[in-house]
Image (tube, helix red, strand yellow):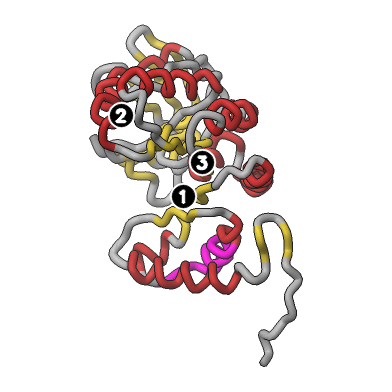
Amino acid sequence: MNCQIASSERQSLSLNKSENLFATIPEILDQVQEGDTVWIDDGKLGTRVESVQEDGIILEVIQARPEKGEKLKNDKGMNFPNTEVHFDALTEKDLEDLDFIAAHTDIIGYSFVQEASDIKRLQQELEARNPSHQIGLIAKIETQAAIKNLPELIVQAAGRQPFGVMIARGDLAVKIGYQRLAEIQEEIMWMCEAAHIPVIWATQVLENLAKTGIPSRSEVTDAAMAQRSECVMLNKGPFIEEAVTILDDVLLRMQAHQIKKTPQLRALHSWE
């Protein structure tokens, strides 16, 4: 499914459970209400729930580029910042995949983690399949609930297995508002530092460089900020090798200035 959406005039989308524009987790559509906002493709397309139907919802487009519009393609993410979403973090497909994962992997990335019970459920499923194999866990922090419950997530996971946190900044920004992202990612890193939990700094790091070969000024500063995490996730692209080289150079330069949240106040030699 591909379609062009512009904001120059009022348009609506039909989000169904089985056809046309549909959600891969249809249970979410039963939990939204009229007036809730739905952001698509990392917030590029903004919509509001116009009406709730028996087989889906009607969305009113409230934000898109006025000149060119937005091309809505397959497999784009949706965020529901005003909706209190409740669903099982492990789908039926996930449970099937765990049969292989429990026997062959060393670490798992866990999306849509919101409560300690989500961690506990995964731990129980893994133990039932392979009690002798300890698998590391990376919790993807991408919702307000995950931020609120982060201390409980850490206690539940880190006491049982190697544990780390990914700051999913794209999804997080849509859910909490872009103006709060810098503040919240700082607080997540501080909390993880106190708990000795490694952090992955993710989403759009050096994206322009990886895709075009030329970085934007702002993304170089963003990459420098990532030095305070233990791991940085880069976007794919034809210039990914250059991106890795430049990221390594930036991080090596910055590590003398900052360790976690503590400035090193080293002597300055920039003009020498």
Q: Which residue is mark 1?
A: 203
**Element marked by disc 1:** strand
Q: Which residue is mark 2?
A: 102
- Label 1: how many Cα within 10 Å (few below 14, some 14–19, many 20+): some
Q: Nearer the viewer, mark 3 or mark 2?
A: 2
Seen from the viewer's position, the closer of residues 118 and 222 is 118
Q: Amino acid at mark 3?
A: Gly
User: In this view of the protein, can residue 184 be seen by the observer?
Assistant: yes
Q: How much space separates mark 3 and mark 1, taking CA atoms?
A: 16 Å
Span colored in magenta: 214-224
Q: Is residue 243 left or right of residue 151?
A: left
Q: Who comes first in sequence, dot 2 or dot 1?
A: 2
Q: Amino acid at mark 1?
A: Thr
Residue 252 position, x and y percent, is 54, 71
* 38 in magenta: no
Indicate which disc residue 15 carries.
Answer: none
